[in-house]
Amino acid sequence: MLGRHRSVLPDWLALYYEEPIEITHGEGRHVWDSDGNRYLDFFGGILTTMTAHALPEVTKAVSEQAGRIVHSSTLYLNRQMVELAERIAQLSGIPNARVFFTTSGTEANDTALLLATAHRRSNTVLAMRNSYHGRSFSSVGVTGNRGWSPTSLSPLQTHYVHGGVRTRGPFAALDDYDFVAACVDDLKDVLGHTRPPAALIAEPIQGVGGFTSPPDGLYAAFREVLHERGVLWISDEVQTGWGRTGEHFWGWQAHGRSGPPDMLTFAKGIGNGMSIGGVVARAEIMNCLDANSISTFGGTQITMAAGLANLTYLLEHDLQGNARRVGGLLIERLRAAAAQVPAVREVRGRGLMIGIELTRPGTDEADPAAASAVLEAARAGGLLIGKGGGHDTSALRIAPPLSLNVAEAEEGAAILERALRSTL
């Protein structure tokens, strides 16, 4: 299978592990590979299997919908799309909200950038250093992470501001209050040297960047400055949405003092593996386009049925509360284990979105080789995790399905502790 993969797929399509695995099926928080090995899944297909593998409620909804009609496009009324849009609009916190569905987070961010630049009549965009927003031409153009930016060409003029990473950079030594103040001053300085921007796009917790985040309230402080100038705030909730952080349903709510964002983008977890993304925006922004636009596959009946069933399950079973409770236990367990490993620089995160940053012992230098070694050792022990991180991929990313129970959290932490101790 590996040889066939390499003969027909791009060289840049990354595979985890020295001996890549084929995942054939899953149940709950576990998956199995083609050799019959069972793994505890702490990465969920890159934060996408949000509730559980083979969740019966979602499987039933997809199966029943497939027996009726799978797709008709946005040219026709679609009851499932309307019902899911109504629920997301209400949950978003954005007043007079409209929802547009896409097939991915990349496409969602691409759409938000189109809306912002059309509404503001500006192609200047502000973004955060260390950010990631997708792999399309425009989303790469606002990605502040060299490892995920294959070209400097872009339809946008992007300016990057400080603040997405609390413990690195020129403001790292400041306390939270002064850190926020310095980042706001930096933002004001950037605005003094640019054409009026269309928007700031920011992840409340940077995903691919290694689950880094600013102090609570940074984006609220930014929004006060932006609002005075009419600049929009796009909150990229592709990884932070749907209660994953435990404390909040959306990541922006940790920065909600100045009100909700003008737009938020979502994807990944809402479909529990089905291809759903989208944008929520105030009506005057969403309706600003003066040309035809549709989405052939965005909001198709089968994905909407899955999204409705998945969202219902998440809310009825309080998976946000579970993420807060079990995630809190997991992060404390990992911090206790990491305290005995000199190569661990930091254990950070919220809810079931946890990062472990690795450095060469005695230095502040990132250690991508160590991250890869721990990834391999965890897999050998029966645990799947991810990795990421700014200039170098040196952070382990831990994001299990939100239905994770305490016993599974303890099991995963024990496996990861052994992997850290055996490789570092």
Image: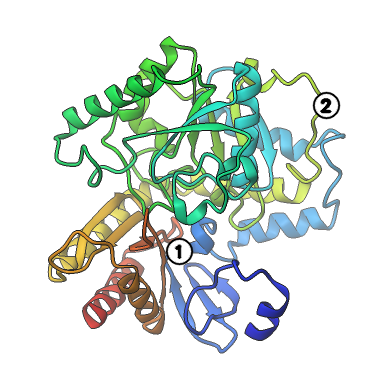
User: Given the image, on which type of amino acid does mark 2 rest?
Assistant: Asn
Q: Residues within 10 Å of mark 2 (few under 14, many from 20)?
A: few
The single residue placed furthest to the bottom in the displayed view is 35
Quarter of the picture containing the C terminus is bottom left
Local crowd at mark 1 within 10 Å, few (<14), some, or many (≥20)?
many
Vertical order, 347 against 154 (above or below): below
What is the x, y in percent for residue 173?
A: 14, 40
Image quarter where the N terminus lies is bottom right
Q: Which residue is mark 2?
A: 292
Considering only vertical position in the picture, is 81 above or below 260?
A: below
Residue 136 visible in rendering: yes
How far across and how far down the image is residue 138, in percent? 61, 40
Identify the secondary structure beneath mark 2.
loop
Query: Closer to the observer: label 2 or label 1?
Result: 2
Query: Where 320 sits versus 12, above or below?
Result: above
Q: Amino acid at mark 1?
A: Phe
Residue placed at 54% from the left, 59% from the top? Answer: 49
Identified at 32% across, 22% down, the residue is 221
Nearest the viewer among 351 and 422 is 422
Based on the displayed image, in which of its 4 quarters is residue 250 positioned? Answer: top left
Residue 44 image offset from top left, x and y in percent: 50, 63
Give the camera-side residue of 21 and 48.
21
Instruction: Tell me the distance, in whole angstroms, between the alpha carbons under discs 2 and 1.
Output: 38 Å
Q: Is residue 87 visible?
A: no
**What residue would you read off at disc 1?**
43
